Amino acid sequence: MTNPADHACIAGQRLNPESLMMSYGYTPAWSEGAIKPPIFQTSTFVFKNAEEGKAFFELAYGLRQQGPDEEMGLIYSRLNNPSLEILENRLTLWDEAEEAASFASGMAAISTTLLALLQPGDVVLHSEPVYGGSDFFLKNVLRKFGIEAVGFRPSASVEEMQAQAAAIAPGRLAMVYVETPANPTNHLIDLDACAALARQYATPDKPVRFVVDNTFLGPVFQHPLKHGADVVLYSATKFLGGHSDLIAGAALSSHALMKEIKAMRTFMGTMCDPNTGWMLMRSLETLKLRMERAAQSAQLIADWLREHPLVERTHYLTHLEGNPVQQDIYQRHCLSPGSMISFDIKGGEAEAFRFLNALRLIKLAVSLGGTESLAEHPGTMTHSDITLEDQKEMGITPQMIRLSIGVEDPQDLMLDLGQAFEAVGMPKEVEVAEMV
Ligand SMILES: *Cc1c(COP(=O)(O)O)cnc(C)c1O
């Protein structure tokens, strides 16, 4: 393979990621001039000779140092595969990461990364709420390996986070794990403050890794590595894949940490498969287009919802008036409010259900970040395993509805939302006035 960086500049000027998603890291001459890379649907790779096989294995198993221009040879698709290597090279561009690894799912990326970087006796300090699967993994799976998870309250100030870190036995804090914006409330966590916390407790023999699940704003609208994160994780099932037709994940980091994470991936077998990798490359070509269009529509819809007589409140990243702390974080971290909106409908669960059951264009389903708009009820669906008391503390109410806005015409989406409000019991005249 040639150095993919050779494709990234014209006249010394670095090109933007969206300009490189169709070509970076691939040369048509490798594949009969095909403009798209083929899917390398193969389990194993033929060595030119036994000496080459030996040399590849020496590198793969770390038996000798990598030469200055030496690349990891292709051995077996659990270790590496050209479809995944091209994908991983492209993934590094959005976050300006040194290296990326693709996984079979977001949970595969999260679990493999945490198992690679933690050991018995360690403590993980994490934000709450986090994705349900991550929450279970942190609290129940890691515990089996003697790793403890300590959550900080959703509304915790930087001082309260400091106090919680200070209460952990010296030398045991090994990771700060954060998901921001939080699902489904869009609550923001201060990445700069978390990075400072991790640095403060790190010692020469005990690093404290700062890991961020950036699924919600994706690599177009938020770049945690620039705010001191050591690892960025994605459920590629969401915006990166973007068409609700695949399950995948990704981790991005430095060469040094990625070596540990990829080694764990090799032994757990949690890598992405070549076909899914190829589908993801197709999706990356339109990532920015899709995310920008969805965010534009979401802004219109969130503003419209806020004014709707049947809406009690909206949770959207440009609706932060009266909350200067959140506003300040938004300005430092986020390039856009994105396309996830939650809102409280007036009433309770019954009204929320009537609304959801009446939607026609917008589909009632969990997941997010796809081309089609989706709606769900966090209290009884994605967040139903959280106790009612904790839900209340996190701001998840029985009347909360979560929307993932897709790429449909925003007026059509508002037409659907409007008729669903009507089904809940909204007077017709107000409805018509609202729509225009
Ligand atoms: C969906 C999701 C995950 C899990 O990803 P899968 O691809 O479903 O395994 C992790 N984190 C966040 C924030 C998610 O939305």
Image: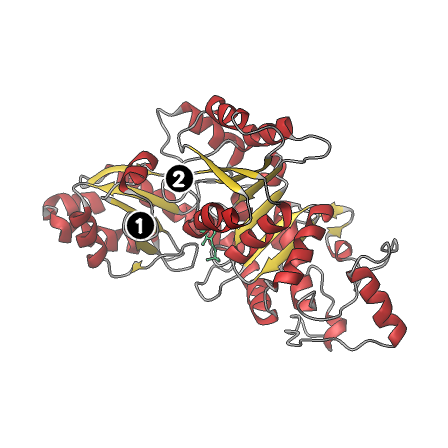
The residue identified by callout 2 is: 186
The amino acid type found where label 2 is placed reads Asn
Distance between the alpha carbons at the discs numbered 2 and 1: 18 Å
Can you tell which mark lies on residue 95? none
Q: How many marks?
A: 2
Left or right, residue 217 beside residue 77: left
Ligand 1 within 8 Å, label 1 CB = no
Mark 1 Cα shell of 10 Å, populated few (<14), some (14-19), many (≥20): few
The amino acid type found where label 1 is placed reads Ser
Q: Is residue 368 above or below residue 189?
A: below
Percent position (x, y) of residue 159? Answer: 48, 21
Q: Earlier in the sequence, mark 2 or mark 1?
A: 2
Can you tell which mark lies on residue 384? 1
Q: Is residue 166 visible?
A: yes
Where disc 2 sits, the SS reads loop
Ligand 1 within 8 Å, label 2 CB = no
Left or right, residue 185 beside residue 436: right
Percent position (x, y) of residue 94? Answer: 61, 48
Of 248 and 130, which appears nearest the observer?
Answer: 130
Left or right, residue 231 beside residue 27: left
Where disc 1 sits, the SS reads loop
Identify the residue at horizontal 69%, vertical 47% (top origin).
Answer: 257
Q: Is residue 223 visible?
A: no
Q: Are marks 2 and 1 in contact (CB under 8 Å)?
A: no
Mark 2 Cα shell of 10 Å, populated few (<14), some (14-19), many (≥20): some
- As drawn, which residue projects farthest toward the top? 159
Of 219 and 208, which appears nearest the observer?
Answer: 208
Identify the residue at horizontal 44%, vertical 44% (top origin).
Answer: 130
Percent position (x, y) of residue 342? Answer: 32, 43
